[in-house]
Amino acid sequence: MEEYTPEERDLLLGASRIFFPTPRFADLFQALGIATFPRPTTYRYQRSRVLQQLLFQYMDCPHEKTRIYHGRRKARIPQDFPFPFLLLSPWTRSAASFLVSDPGDFLRTAPLFNPVLARRKVAWRERWRLLWVGFQCLGGQRLAPFESGGPSFEPVPLEPPFPGGVMERSRDLLLRAGLDDIVVEWGQTQDGEWKIIGLSRPPVKWETPGGVVHRHEHIARLIMEGKL
């Protein structure tokens, strides 16, 4: 904060809302009673798979079996999860997700993170992603069939009814947890049950059936219209 001039600090302290603060300052502004967009809670859950897992448990969200292991407790993972299973980095900024097929895989990957998340491997029948800004859904995408370049998400229209109630479930979760700028991903199991997969930081651009939504331009319009 000392790098800001006194005039700039006065502007910050006198603001009614600060947009896109540096994440490490978001909690400071919250302590000072200054609103931010995104909210500090949004930053926290965007970045941490550990916090997401605890949130899903607390909110009783349907999700695939996942557990958090620290230190020596990681040795118990093969007892709790039959092969094959997934090991995940605790941070969403790391895309690290390892398929552990045998004890050798486990011994190589378990030391990479502490804590580490273990998750049962699921062959999803279908996967959806929803982009939310200010508790409004701006677009949906469905995982397209595998092609030579690998899986990709294709835009789908936001027309009810939505599969598995994913729209209503997402809105309820985000409102209760105070997550106002985020992507929610859901998956359908082979027996037809819909489960939440995770939360992630939204991209700047999002493909929809009607064209590309530029998230920053949308937020700027909300600010100009006094809606944010």
Image: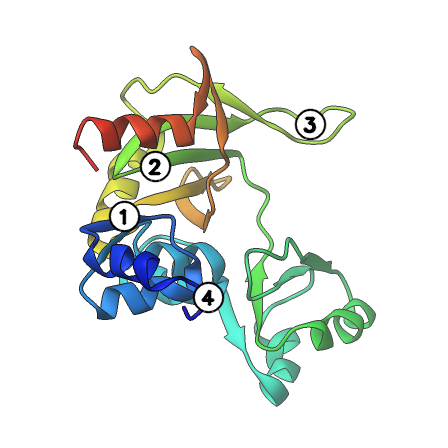
First in residue order: circle 2 vs circle 1 = 2
Q: Residue at x 18, y 51 (%)?
A: 16
The foreground one among 12 and 152 is: 12
Residue with the mark numbered 2 = 132
Q: Are marks 3 and 1 in contact (CB under 8 Å)?
A: no
Cα distance in 3D space between marks 4 and 2: 33 Å
3 vs 1, front mark: 1
Q: Residue at x 61, y 64 (%)?
A: 89
Dot 2: element: strand
Q: Which mark is residue 146?
A: 3
Marks 3/4: CA–CA distance: 49 Å
| Residue type for callout 3 | Phe
Comes first in the chain, label 3 or label 4: 4
Quick one: label 3, few (<14), some, or many (20+) residues within 10 Å? Answer: few
Q: CA distance from mark 2 to mark 1?
A: 9 Å
The x and y percentages for residue 141 are 47, 27
Q: Percent position (x, y) of residue 31?
A: 23, 70
In the displayed structure, 105 sits above or below 178; it is below
